Amino acid sequence: MKVVSFGSLNYDLAIWLDRLPGPDETLRARRIEAFSGGKGANQATAAARLGAQAHMVGCVGDDDRGRWLLDVLSASGVDTSRVRITETPTGTAVPLIAPEDVSIVIVAGANASTGIADAEGAAEIIAAADVLLLQGEVAAAGARRAAQAARSGGTTVVFNPAPVDPFLVEAVAPLTDVLVMNRAEQAQVAAIGPETGHCETVITLGGRGAQVGEVVVPPLPAEVVDPTGAGDAFCGALGVALAEGRPLIEAARFANAAGALAVATPGAQPSMPTRAAVDSLLDGRREQGYRP
């Protein structure tokens, strides 16, 4: 299995609060901690931990944060040889984590430099992969070129348009095989109206599982400590399952298990589960009759 993630790498500064702040309000935080993150890097990490040969394509700054992110990815088994070092500082994200919700503020930094040249430099790897993972944290031109490279090689394109960028959605959706969104993103994408008739859609439903077409794939039990990264665990796992040749509904069941495990651990990349953990959770649920 070979999975390529073309996307962002972020230094995450997570802040835990009793509740999210209102307008013009100052709150005391309960905790603050730094993690490795970025939707692209998170999904690459998930793929690697689930057994895929994972490659990361993106950009970081020539700074301590960027070097740390690359070290963490490499330690998880991700090939970072296609991550470019730029003069722009490494991207930063600030997740605000409350008991019932999480909001994330992103400063693109070096991620804004990820573009056509990066996609062309990795075109051979992308075309030889089983799955290409795309997200919404890099510019449209580079993501579209990566998707074109995937299409030329018969690589399955999995696109998670988060955050939703109209230009990116219009550029990538027509080249997508599987579109992964939550309900809010689904409404935003529908308002943009890109060409999506040829691709399959997976809607993530949080604690209610996921929906593939008209089929609802039920959730697995989860103890929610930090929901940051759960969607990325889902997408990375979905990509791995599709790379293994599983049908989409079965792939969504595998991805549900990864997402359920991810919410039990603080941080984005630290919460990406191993293959052994996902298989163990699914094996236990099968004994109880879990089926989509």
Image: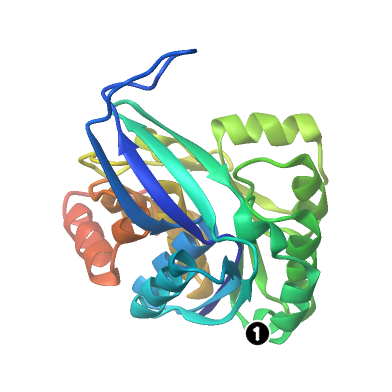
Which amino acid, by three-letter code, is at mark 1?
Answer: Ile
Q: Is residue 68 above or below residue 252?
A: below
Q: Residue at x 76, y 29 (%)?
A: 191
Q: Is residue 7 above or below residue 227?
A: below
Viewer-closest of 66 and 128: 66
Q: Is residue 170 left or right of residue 220?
A: right
Q: Residue at x 75, y 66 (%)?
A: 115
Q: Residue at x 73, y 62 (%)?
A: 143
Q: Is residue 156 above or below residue 210?
A: below
Q: Is residue 121 left or right of residue 230?
A: right
Q: Residue at x 37, y 50 (%)?
A: 256
Label 1: which residue? Answer: 125
Q: Determine if residue 50 is in view.
A: no
Rendered location of residue 82, percent (x, y): 61, 80
Viewer-closest of 11 and 211: 11
Rendered location of residue 129, percent (x, y): 61, 80
Q: Quadrant of residue 83?
A: bottom right
Rendered location of residue 179, percent (x, y): 64, 50
Q: Is residue 63 above or below residue 28?
A: below
Q: Quadrant of residue 271?
A: bottom left
Q: Is residue 41 left or right of residue 134?
A: left
Q: Determine if residue 56 is in view.
A: yes
Viewer-closest of 58 and 86: 86
Q: Residues within 10 Å of mark 1 (few under 14, many from 20)?
A: many
SS under mark 1 = helix
